[in-house]
Structures are given as C-alpha cells and as structure tokens.
Image (cartoon, coloured by chain):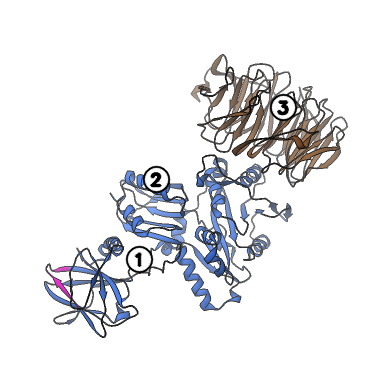
Amino acid sequence: MTTHNSGRVPVTVLTGFLGAGKTTLLNRILTENHGKRIAVIENEFGEVGVDQDLVIGAEEEIFEMNNGCICCTVRGDLIRILGNLMKRKDKFDYILIETTGLADPGPVAQTFFVDDEMRSKLALDAIVTVVDAKHIWQHLDDSNEAKEQIAFADVILLNKIDLVTPEELDKLEARIRGMNAATKIYRTRDARIEMDKILNVGGFNVARALEVDPKFMEPEYPFEWAGVYLLQRGEYEWIMHPGPDPTMNVALLPLPEASATELEALQMEAVLLFSEKEHATAANDVLRPEKKLRELRLAEGETRFNIHIDEPGNYALFTQHHPDEFSAKLQSVHGPLAPLLTREYKPDHEHDEEVSSVGITTPGDLDEKKLNEWLRELLTTKGTDIFRMKGVLSIKNQEERFVFQGVHMLFDGRPDRPWGNEERRNSLIFIGRKLDRAKLNEGFRSCLA
Amino acid sequence: MPRIKNVKPLTASWHREIEDHVIDLIWSRDGRSLAAAAVSGPITIFERETGRIVHHFAGHRFGTSSLSWNADGTVLTSAGQDGKVRWWDTLRGEELLACEGGAAWVEHVAWSPAGEVLASAAGKEVRFWDRTGQLLSSFGDHPSTIADIAWHPQDKVLAACAYNGVTLCLPHQPGRAERLEWKGSSLVLAWSPDGRFLATGDQDSTVHFWIIATRQDLQMWGYPTKVRELAWDCSGRYLATGGSPEVIIWDCSGKGPAGTRPISLRGHENFISALAYQHHGAHLASADQDGLVLLWRPEKNQQPIAYARADSGVSLLAWSPDDRLLATGTESGHVEVYVR
C-alpha cells in the first residue's frame, strides 16, 4: 500500500499567517502546468474559473457539535461546498483549501475524519504551512495559532529566506523542529517550490511518509551518546575534564549482548531512567551498574569516578552529552578502553517550547487490547493537547504492519503491507502541547506484549 | 438481497437522462410536468406521461441548486451558483427574469403554499419576492449560512435552519422574526403537514423536533451518520428519517415521539439517500446510495411491497401530486418514473 485512496480526491490544506506567502503559493500552484484540474476554496469572496480550475470564496464557518467535544468541531462551509463539488461529473483532480491567517487547522482536518460524506469522497493529503522566515519569531512566542499551524503541518515552507541570514534560518528551523519533529521543511523565496513537494505528498498517509523519509520519526533522546563496553570483574575509572556544563547525567546498565538490537531495546529503559530524579555523584564516588540516574559533578581539572564491576559482561553507558565535549574516557588498570559499539543520538531540544514532539521507537510486539485501552484513555484525557500523531505499529499475531494517524481525539488506523523479512518494530510520534515525554514512553511500553 | 425476495418490481413508465447528478426533481402542482436540475446547471422539463422533453434551459453557470414551481405551473424558478434566482416561462420556454440572490451561491428557492411569495436563500440571507419578481423584503440576520428553508403548510411563515438554530421569518414583517435556538448544525427542515411540528435532520447524527405550540424541543439520538432525509406522512403523525441503512419512523401522535421506540424498516444495505411519503396516501418510498428503491406501507407492514433498481445512488424521490407516479433522480443523471 502506498497512496491508495480508493478513488478519493486528495485535499491539501494551506495555512500560514497573513503575509507569509499563501496567496503567492496558491497562484503558483494554479498557474503551474501540472495537468490537474484543481478546485480552490479560499477565504475571500468571489467565484471565478481560472482556465480549467475553479476558485470558490468561502467564509469559514466552524460548527461545534452539541456534545461540546473538540474533535467534533468541523468546517460546515467545507462540507456544504465540497459536498456539492463532488457531485459533479467533471470531478476535480485536486482540492486546495486556503485557511485564514489566524485559523486553527484542527477543524479543517477534522472535517475529513468526522463527516462520513467527506471521508468517503475526499482524502486529506497534507497540511502545508507557509512561514514568513523574518516575521514568524514574534508570533512563535505569543500566538497559539502560529504554534498550532506549525504543529499540525506535514510540510512547512520557510518563505522569504532572502530577508534573513542563513544563521537565522538555521535557528528558526531548529526551533520549528523542536515543535514538530515529523514535518518536512523547505526553504523558499517567493514561495517557489516544486509541486510534488506540496501536492500528493501523503502527509496523512503514514506508510508513505515513512517510505519517503524513514528518519522523520526518529525520536529525541535525553542522552546524546551510548557506548557498549565488555568489562571484567574489577575496578575501572570514568575520567572527565571540564566541559560545557558543570554536571553530566549518566546511566550504566548491563546489556546481554554487544549488538545494536540489544542496545536499542535498552534505550527505552534508559529514556525512562533519565526522566527520574538524578543522584548526585562527586569525584571518587563509586558508579555501579544499576537502575539509577547519576549526576556526575565535575571538579576543577580532571575528575575521576570509580566503577565497580562484580559480574563480567557487556555494559552500556548512556551519557547526557557526547563524551568528547568533556574529553571523557573509560579506563581500566591497563589503560583506556575502546567501546565495542557506540551510538549517537539526536539531542533532545531545549524544551522551553510549549508545543513539542515525542517520538517513540521500540522493537517488539504490542498487545492489541492493552494498546487500545491505553490509546482510549490517552485520547480521552489528552486529546485536546495532542494535535497530531502518526505511527507504524507491530501488533502481536498480526502479519501486517498497522499504520495509524490522528488529529486530536480522532484516530484512523488500518493494517498495511505484511512485515515480511523486515524487523518488527514500533515507531510513532506525538505532536502537541505540554506533552509528557516520560509518561508517553512509559504508557506505550506498558502495551508491549 | 434476501430481504426483498418475493417483492414485485415497480412498473417503469419512462426513463430519460440529463447532463449530470440530479440535484433537484419536482412535479408542477397540477402534476402535468416534472422538472429536473443537473448539478452542473441545465434544467429540463418533462411531460408527465411520456417523458417527452418540453423545455431545456441552460440553468445557472457553475451549477443549479434548487427548483420551485409557482402555483399554476407557468413559472419555474431556480437558484444557482451564479448568485441568481432565475424565472423560467414554462409556456413559452424562455427566461423571464434573473434576480440577485444576495451571495455567490443561492442554495434554495421555495414558493409559499398559496403561491404568493417566493423565498430564496443565499449565504446568511433570505429574500422574499412577489409574483412579479419584485423584492418584498430580506432577512439577513441568520447565525450562519442557511442550510434549508421550508414554508409552514398553512401559515405565511418561512422556517430557515442554520448552525445554531431555526429562524421563523414573516415576509411582510421582517422585523418580527423569531429564533428557535439550538446549538448544533441542522441540515434539512420539514414541517409536519398539520404544522404542529418542525423537524430538522442534523450534522451530529440526530433528529430534532420543535413542538410549535410550546416552542419545546426534542432530540432523537442513535443515528449512525448525519441525517439529511426527512419525510412526513400526510396526516402529520409519522416522520420517516434516513441517516442509516434503516428507515426510522417516529410516531408523533399523542404526546409526541419523546421516549417512544420508532418503527424501523429494514431492506436497504447502504445508507438511505432519499425518502418520500405520498401526498394523500400511506405509501412511503425510500432509496439508498446503491440505487435500490423500495416502496412500503409502514403502518400495515414492515416489509417492502415493491422495489426498483437505479443505475447509481438515488439523489431524489418525488411523488406526482395525484400519488400515481413516483419519479426518481440519480447521481449519474438518470430520471426514471414508475407507476404505483
């Protein structure tokens, strides 16, 4: 399965603040020779045919249903207009919806989940957000709408790059990534972009999004490095020098085998450990392999921590920062030890952001019943704060990969292609407000069979 | 289709094809002509017995949305997405008038029961016109885009529903409109023939009743999808509703439908797409998104008594004023007329 929308017409939702470049992008799409017959629904008045395309002005009408549930908030005007358009014989190949600058993308996206008629005839392809690279900063701090537009986006155009320096762009991109780790980011000037980057991208098709960019769901970790060492019974030393911080958190855990797979399985445990309270550890204190997070306190110059090993075997040391930043090394009585295996992790961004992403990846099969219960509970209690989620799951006794995605409390999942020879694993990402990384990890892990 | 075994097919009288999805289908009040509008615009008038095309009008650019005949069948009015209300002379076969509906999409037109006033709805505005096409009044204070309009069967009141409630408007006294507030999105509206009830079918998969005498309201839950099909029987006792593969019929006799268990008619396998009760008789026609048409006599028996199959989903059903002919319109543009 890739983009099987079973004849459904794809819909792209265009969001972005006033002046970001939405209209420029829209005109570009309409004038580009893409061979598609496009219907555009914009929030301005007037209905005009542009060659073979149709532009319809619509006034945003948000319908909240009687039960007051946020996920039942839909765009009534879209149901009416699209319902009519889809009746015509000369159907459109593509639907583009432009939202107002201050729009919350939630109701637009939900319209395509909640309304049976919309769901049977149309398929939400992606939410594309145009960002004014120069002026977005002021909004990122004070506007919920700007944060939501970024959090909901499958594709973000950092537009007007000619007005800012490359350093500013890097900074902006990093900040956006910190909020939405799953989005694709393109840098544009005058909203110039190839059409296949924004149309038919399958942002709401998890399977396809993963195939295009397998790294998009790579989660963030509270540690930057892990090294696997084969240690004998006896004494070792972890030696550090002054670095960027006066302290560094580490965890030393036994590993059954020095393999990448085993290390990966251990990562989740380390993530949980890193969310616990750290135990202050000063020079010459003893560091044991144990389920404890150690906060190593550095002294002036060289600081040595003693490691005491009772059971010979493989051990993984997870460190908050890369050891190179502290010229750190593990040493036995015979001299420095080289790790058998190391892995670097994408650093956890500085989460001063209210909006962030939590990615979870772990091998193993899930217990379907536990998963359903956990998700139901999670979406009932936190659905308002979870803007988007996507994932591919490995469910016990099921041959196919299970792909899902959701908007707020709405959830759409189905079996995808068989796993075949591929390693069975789970990858999922949550994008939302005030997400509790450790709790999400813990909850998900409790669903493992 | 085991449920409709031993059921007779309906006798087809004639069949014609129009340009596109049948978006409206109505008989003239004298029953001599049937008008059909295609969603893409064209309007066709057929002769009752043979289906001969009497007139073919271009309709509205960007699409036609609604039709209404005047009292004596000499004028057919239409609403469309060119922002116009158009008047068609059905004797001479030409356009008489084009009035501004007030917004880009005029979605509804409806002549009053006595045939004196024409109402049109576009965006949040209802406009009232006299028989010559003069604007009488307009009412633009609806809470959101008007989803449907319906004249009270005897009174000179027009009900218009929108998100957040129903408005009752008086064409000659636009200032005296009354709001029946309800937080929700009503999609269709139907008065009981005795005017006691006003029913709405809603986006949140419910049916809402307003008891006009007391202005009290009731809500009926449990539908699997939004309800866009409502049909009252001629006595005003039964309301048939869609929003499900079953036809759900509420009994409004006595104290009304509150707390009662509705009649449920099973025979369709896909969602109901159209419902029509006879004007004087007790037969109910139902149709679904797969094109199955069933005829029932719900009071007597909960099994269908006749069926027909259309080539695609049925968008409309219309009984001729004498209840002898049943017209069906489909998504693929077919108009078929059956003899009861």
The quarter holding residue B215 reads: top right
Q: Which residue is mark 3?
A: B152
Question: Residue A376: which disc?
Answer: 2
Where is residue A256 shown, x and y percent of the image?
19, 63
Marks 1 and 3 belong to one chain: no
- Residue toward you, A23 or A12: A23
Dot 2: few (<14), some (14–19), or many (≥20) neighbours within 10 Å?
some
Supply the letter of whichever chain is brown: B
SS at mark 3 in the image: loop
The quarter holding residue A142 reads: bottom right
Q: Do the residues bearing badges 2 and 3 touch, measured as CB atoms within 8 Å?
A: no
The chain holding disc 2 is A
Dot 1: few (<14), some (14–19), or many (≥20) neighbours within 10 Å?
many
Question: A71 above or below B167?
Answer: below
Type of the residue with mark 3: His
Type of the residue with mark 2: Arg
The chain holding disc 3 is B
The answer to whether any part of residue A236 appears in the image is yes
Residue B72 lies within the magenta run: no
Question: Residue A221: which disc?
Answer: 1
Marks 2 and 1 sit apart, C-alpha to C-alpha, by 26 Å
User: Given the current orientation, which residue lies at the most extreme top position?
Assistant: B300
Image quadrant for the C terminus of chain B?
top right
